[in-house]
Image (cartoon, helix red, strand yellow):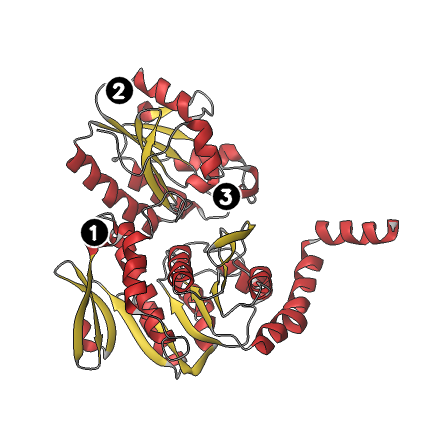
């Protein structure tokens, strides 16, 4: 028994041994099991939006009555219920999702680290989705350019069945370039470019999400009716919705689904606090207005800032307070870009190191210093790490008027869940007047 414990300790302490054993498990255990299961698979990768698209697809098919096994960076879900919590976007998550009882299909978020360390966890998927490619995690794990990142993510496209479908972001040149890597049916989603250049495409026009298959076009749903777009203001979630709808279209030959179920899911998903809590929520804590984001790279920050500025103007906020952090495994260019983006947005900043597991090779002090680079010193409050209630009290001493608090990269600072919000105060679905 002591010998077994010593071996386990050695494996846990030696990353190389651990990765080697996981790769063996992927090749000789997970992939053969998933292949023999012979269940349809949707695999989702990209830089931003993976988890939201995955969760939305999980809800759509669960609402349609299917037994769905889903793995995400938030955990593993069965029939929409969380059964394993934690980052399960790699092969381990595939294994757990595939062992959900009587599973009808698998919906798999396929993240960069899981691909590099262990592989994708399946031989072929029926539908492969790439949301976008942006600069993130560069100079890490041997990925030194955005082109190399695109090549890595394209593994999902290469592993899509020829009789299946690939879903590509038509506004992203690197993603569009993946079309030549597969013989599967191509389905695009886009908001910016001319949708008529594609035969199969989901697009946004005059406030509607629309679909064009061949020569036939139709309006599907107005963005004001899609909860997670917040009346169309959260534009990146319009893209995420279109990516999910394109995946449903690609999967239709394998698993039929009623279009009314899809539409009703779009109407309700996001109206409940627990639907996508680790990605974006807004509401009230202790009588103050909060937005909690999952900003993790410059593109994500830019998207969230656009929304924040719209809300500030429309709701008449006088001040914005930013609560900022970042993971440690990024290059210096990454932190400088974030610092430049947020500097003009907020009147006050609380800049914190992330939780211990997100330090990833940097000290907390170094991360705080890098994030502070382009922010005026007089805007930075550096009196220690406060709780949310203490941040509110301290900010009230500096600012008068209607204030909105923005928690950037909320997952890095707090383990966001309903119970924790209950400790901090009631979190409502929308702002207090």
| Disc on res. 399 | 2
Q: Position of residue 82 (x, y in %)?
A: 51, 51
Q: Residue at position x 46%, y 65% from top?
A: 107
Q: Residues within 10 Å of mark 3 (few under 14, many from 20)?
A: many
Q: Given this view, does label 1 or label 2 mark the residue nearer the observer?
A: 1
Residue 67 in the figure: left or right of residue 52? right
Q: Nearer the viewer, residue 140 or 162?
A: 162
* C-alpha gap between disc 1 and disc 2: 30 Å
Task: Look at 45% across and 38% down and name the residue there.
Answer: 418
C-alpha gap between disc 3 and disc 2? 31 Å
Near mark 2 (Cα within 10 A), the count class, few <14, some 14-19 or many ≥20, is some
**Residue 291 in view (yes/no):** yes
Q: Residue at x 31, y 72 (%)?
A: 176
Side of 323 where 199 appears, left or right: left
Judged by depth in the image, the label closer to the viewer, 3 or 2, is: 2
Q: Secondary structure at mark 1?
A: loop
Residue 164 versus residue 116 in the image, above or below: below
Residue at the disc numbered 1? 232
Q: Residue at x 56, y 42 (%)?
A: 357
Is there CB contact under 8 Å for labels 1 and 3? no
Residue that protrudes farthest toward the left in the picture: 206
Q: Which residue has dot 3 on it? A: 328
């Amino acid at each position: 028994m002591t010998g077994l414990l010593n071996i386990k300790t050695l494996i846990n302490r030696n990353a190389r041994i651990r990765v080697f054993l996981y790769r063996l498990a992927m090749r000789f255990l997970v992939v053969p099991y998933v292949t023999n299961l012979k269940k349809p698979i949707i695999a989702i990768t990209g830089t931003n939006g993976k988890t939201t698209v995955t969760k939305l697809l999980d809800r759509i098919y669960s609402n349609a009555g299917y037994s769905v096994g889903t793995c995400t960076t938030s955990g593993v879900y069965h029939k929409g219920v969380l059964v394993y919590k934690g980052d399960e976007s790699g092969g381990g998550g595939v294994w757990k999702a595939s062992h959900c009882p009587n599973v009808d299909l698998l919906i798999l978020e396929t993240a960069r680290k899981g691909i590099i360390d262990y592989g994708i966890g399946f031989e072929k998927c029926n539908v492969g989705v790439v949301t976008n490619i942006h600069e993130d995690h560069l100079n890490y794990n041997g990925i030194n350019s955005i082109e190399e990142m695109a090549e890595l993510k394209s593994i999902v496209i290469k592993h899509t069945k020829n009789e299946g479908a690939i879903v590509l972001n038509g506004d992203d040149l690197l993603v569009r370039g993946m079309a030549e890597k597969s013989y599967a049916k191509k389905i695009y989603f886009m908001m910016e470019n001319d949708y008529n250049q594609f035969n199969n495409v989901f697009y946004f026009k005059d406030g509607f999400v629309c679909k064009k298959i061949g020569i036939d076009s139709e309006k599907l749903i107005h963005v004001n009716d899609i909860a997670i777009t917040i009346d169309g203001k959260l534009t990146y979630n319009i893209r995420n919705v279109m990516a999910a709808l394109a995946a449903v279209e690609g999967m239709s030959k394998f698993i039929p689904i009623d279009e009314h179920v899809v539409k009703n899911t779009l109407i309700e998903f996001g109206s409940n606090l627990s639907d996508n809590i680790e990605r974006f929520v807004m509401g009230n804590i202790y009588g103050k207005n909060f937005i909690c984001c999952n900003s993790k790279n410059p593109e994500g920050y830019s998207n969230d800032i656009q929304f924040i500025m719209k809300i500030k103007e429309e709701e008449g906020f006088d001040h914005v307070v930013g609560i900022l952090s970042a993971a440690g495994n990024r290059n210096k260019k990454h932190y400088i870009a974030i610092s430049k983006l947020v500097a003009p947005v907020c009147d006050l900043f609380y800049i914190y190191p992330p939780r211990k597991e997100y330090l990833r090779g940097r000290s907390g002090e170094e991360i705080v210093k890098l994030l502070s680079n382009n922010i005026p010193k007089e805007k930075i409050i550096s009196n220690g790490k406060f709780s949310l209630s203490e941040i509110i009290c301290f900010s009230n001493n500096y600012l008068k008027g209607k204030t909105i608090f923005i928690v950037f990269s909320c997952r890095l600072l707090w383990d966001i869940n309903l119970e924790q919000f209950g400790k901090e105060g009631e979190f409502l679905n929308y702002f207090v007047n």
